[in-house]
Amino acid sequence: MKKSKKLFSKCYILICFLFFYLPILVTVIFSFNSSKSLTRFTGFSMRWYAELFRNSEVASAVYVSVTIAVLATVISTVLGTITAIGLSRSRKLLKEYLLNVNNIPILNPEIVTAISLMLLFSSFGMTKGYLTMLLAHIAFCTPYVITSVYPKVRGLDPNLANAAMDLGATPAQALTKVVIPIIRPGIYAGALLAFTMSFDDFVISYFVSGNGVKNISIVVYNMTKRINPTINALSTVVIAVIILVLLAMRLLPKLRRGKNSRRPGNRALAWAVAAICLCAVCLTLPKGMGQAGEKPSLKIYNAGEYIDPDLIGLFEDMYDCTVIYETFESNEMMYTKLSGGETYDILIPSDYMIERLIREEALAPIDWSLIPNSEYLMPEVTDRSYDPGNVYSVPYFWGTVGILYDTSVVDEKDLKAGWEILRDDAYAGNVYMYDSERDAFMVALKALGYSMNTTDEQQIQEAFDWLTDQRDTMAPIYAGDDVIDNMVSGNKALAVVYSGDAAYIMSENPDMAYFTPEEGTNIWYDAMVMTKDCANTRLAHEFMNFMLDPENALANTEFVGYTSTVSPAFEEMRSGTYKGIDAYVPDVDNSNNEIFAYQEAKVKKIYAELWTKVKAK
Amino acid sequence: MNKLIELKNLTKNFEDQQVLRGIDLNVYENEFLTLLGPSGCGKTTTLRIIAGFEEADSGQVLFDGKDISALPPYKRPVNTVFQKYALFPHMNVFDNIAFGLNIRKADKQEIRRKVEAMLALVGLEGFGSRDVTLLSGGQQQRVAIARALVNEPKVLLLDEPLGALDARIRKQMQMELKKIQREVGITFIYVTHDQEEALSMSDTVVVMNEGMIQQIGSPTDIYNEPENRFVASFIGESNIVEATMIEDYLVGFDGCRFECVDRGFGEMEPVEVVLRPEDLDIVDPENARIRGTVRQVTFKGVHYEILVETDIRTYMIHTTDYTEIGKHVGLDFGPEDIHVMWPMGSY
Amino acid sequence: MKHFKKLVRPYLIWSFVLIVVPLFLIVLYAFTVDGNAVLTLNFTLDNLKKVLEPTYANVFVKSLALGAVTTGICLLIGYPLAYMIARFKESTQNLLIMLVTIPMWINLLLRTYAWMNLLADNGIINRLLMKLGLSPVTMMYTDFSVVLGLVCNFLPFMVIPIHTSLSKMDRSLIEAAYDLGANKVQAFRQITLKLSMPGVINGIVMVFLMAISTFVIPKLLGGGQYVLIGNLIESQFISVGDWNFGSAISFILAVIILIAMRVMKRFDKGDE
């Protein structure tokens, strides 16, 4: 009877652990996959590891994560320990006040802490970056140190320090030679907790960092656009390091048992921490040296996965400068960062956002004489409504929004319905909508035959009804960029996507096809603009010119998959790599197509609120 | 007296370590029986097997003639007072004592009456609503006893219950335990490593070592007639001397022959002789067969402890008379003071 | 020892600047119009009133419900796990607890992506099902996938505090209960469960806190239709740009949680 019970509990534990480790196992296995797929294992390869070590963004993220974690751990441990010791001797009122305040970051939801810190930094006009991230990490790690050290201090005989001082120790010596050694287990526990919290943090870092400073979590989050097994390789490396440290912690005490080590566990921990610090230093050195030179620099803010990273290196070499490259998830996020006081030299936003920035006089005019490669620009992309005469913007990529469909599932005849196919019962539960209020309302407004830039509340209300009806009858999934991977895997039959993404998906999954409905769609342009704060306008122009160079533009469009604005590159792709993929060629002839116009804040809020209502029934 | 518990050839191993090597023991009604031995001798394991917390590898536990080896602890008619009391920290004194009765869903009125009676028995009237974690060691001890006794067990098992108390309270609790046992009139099985505690409270003492019973007997028997060197040295202080049993009633050691009261060891057999220090007298060397020099004198309150060095060994003597260090003296003892036993390893 | 009193001073200042002031800013934003303009404070209750609108109130209800479900499942799975682990010998316990802790060191987003790949319509699990000749199951973008992701990520935070309180418990207390006639179920309910309550409450608080305020996991595993408080706050700050409304939601969330904490604390103390 006893044996069967043991067996039962062993099975239970095994199942639970399987549950914990299944995702980790999948991550590790697919880091060795020879293809990009994360669901189909096609063969063993180390290519993602090679890519990992070439990827400078990942390298700098590892550097940031490790150094921030180590610094935050050390500082918060020291701060937390001395505070805990001081607290045990404080007056009751002060003690209660501090312990309560200290509890706030632990009890408050992470997102509230993150936002409060973001508000703090922007109110003080601090530039977000490494320092703000470090301060934030110390701020949320210290409470954990205090809560794990304070009980140990409280349990201490108050005469211990007195005894030490009676024997001639100064207060400082009493602290370091008597008090701290006794509460050491609590300090280690606190430090370990702080390190874990800091190293793995996403939410707080996401809100308080900026200027290209990203930790691993932020990089991973930005990679949703194109899931990339490089990140699996990275996490496999992280797992391997953790296992090595753990093994070292278990083995070291055994190896040292011969010698007289009193606290083997603690020693091992000290060794582990030392090893991590050493790693951090090793990683710091090349980085530090790289930044030593006083080269001119250019700060660029672009959407995630929206440039061939090799081009950045090439540009740096050619013009002997440093590029600080940062990515955003959406135009709105970029705008939020800008209003939070961030400054950049070059931005690459979309049409309507450029219109807004022009209105807010945030941009500097382009000196076209400095961009000789502008002769290669396609006529279809210049002089558009968002910036007539291209005073401020140099077109970068362009395309449409349309419907991607699985030819093996969708009947060609059904396509005649245009946008209404998204309300066709035959495909209920088989639809991805794009999770953005403007794109979703564009679909509804176009389906209803209205302008997608309408400010007529009646029309907006009708579009809202269209969307709620679709939600109730079709149960669509409102996906973000994860739609790309989902459609590559053929998870659903229909999806509203950007043409560039469609082109990429079609190149990976030949079953997919793309069409833009007759009722018209959003034709969009992303363009490079120069901010008013741009200090080195010459270098900025050189960069824009560099990106229009046919060869570079080709490399870029090949990497990203979006439609180039540079004529030779466009033609090359159209007849070469993306031959037959019609999504690559935007439909410019349909007069129903529109460009997004800038929305007044009031109108924007209406859309935003209605969209929230659609999603949250 | 009726046999209440019978242990038959119990053995127990913990991870290749033999803890019990065949324990046979009878426990009688109304008996105060003590399992005495050094730590690791198997006394606590024996107790835990009786309580049902451990299962013996082989052997039987009979209760009133019925085998209860397979019964879980909560179905056995015994209750335990734990080493560190194991009082439930989330309950007050009353609820701790009432626990067993509540489990049996006894009548509320009856519970109250019984618990109050128990509180009175252990001298804790009015402590019912106290927090058990705030009681003194002695008070916790009393709660633990009351909690066990309120269930009216046939046997109370006590696992070193006084070990955590200081010397003065321990003395007091010894007397009270004995008193309580007499009042409730049930069997106590008591585990301790303190020989004085065992001798002063028990009706029967069971001396254990290395998983075996060394001797079972009344406190006087155990003290006066130790069966082997282990019992002799564990209980009280003694001079243990290798000797030869020349014949019945005649034993030889230190080069002399002495009359004794022991028989049945055979002829010319190697044996050991126990001489209790208080049985030895210091006399004029001329009247004694064993002679030596006083090397050390220590005042012990009631008596002096004197070490006398002879040519062969050093004897310890307890006497109320003072003797100077360096004095040449003789040692004297009567035949009834010599306890002959089998040497270590031959039983 | 009074020399050491001064040691709290740095943190006194630090916590004021980095904990108290930021919270004050949230409150300030929550009660003003256009908080960006610091000099002209226009106080208003509109932001808070807006939170009470059915759409947003609904989001709160949904988040709290999801948090409760996640916490409940974590407790149901985590308590037995912690209990079983606590019954092994100490070295094995340490190893098992280490194994529970390790996943927490691996990026939460990475683990969530892995779940996406496992649960997708054409994902690993469905491929396996199809190979076995079974029909595929839709798991992604459902309540199931969200709860699964939340439970997988937060379960260690339930297991560890419960295990701590169970392993601290004196084994002889259970024996005492058996000895006094309690059977296994009674001993478990009256002793083990009661004495592990501090750990249970700790676990419930931690999991619930994280579950109601998370925005990454629901966004990735539940899709855009999974609007929870966290997503709402994030979208107000990141995409809508209405910091005042975002602060108002954060403020209310913080208030709800602080009240819940108080209640929990009282419950915890009353129980002891």
Image (tube, coloured by chain):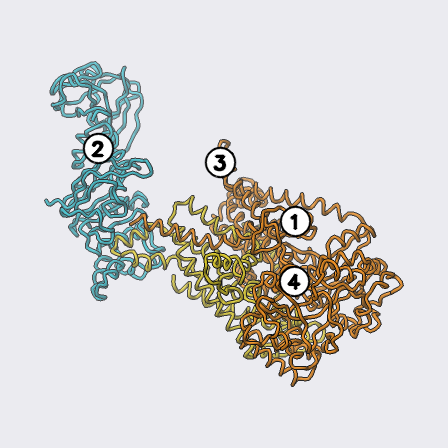
Quarter assignment of residue B147: bottom left
Q: How many marks?
A: 4
Q: Residue at x 19, y 24 (%)?
A: B342
Nearest to the eye among marks 2 and 3: give it: 3
Q: Is residue A124 above or below residue A242?
A: below
SS class, disc 1? helix
According to the colouring, which chain is cyan? B
Question: Who is closer to the viewer here, B175 or A62?
Answer: A62
Is disc 2 in the same subunit as disc 4?
no
Instruction: Specify the quadrant that holds the N terminus of chain B.
Output: top left
Q: Are marks 4 and 1 in contact (CB under 8 Å)?
A: no
Where residue A357 sits, quadrant-wise, is: bottom right
Question: What is the x, y in percent for residue B102?
Answer: 25, 62
Residue type of the residue flagged with mark 4: Met
Query: Which residue carries the number 4 mark?
Result: A506
Along the horizontal axis of the image, is B297 left or right of B22?
Answer: right
Subunit ID for the residue under disc 1: A
Q: In the rendering, which numbered label is found on residue A52?
A: 1
* Label 4: how many Cα within 10 Å (few below 14, some 14–19, many 20+): many
> Mark 1 vs mark 3: same chain?
yes
**Front one among A472 and B237:** A472
> How many residues crowd around disc 2 within 10 Å: few (fewer than 14), some, or many (20 or more)?
some
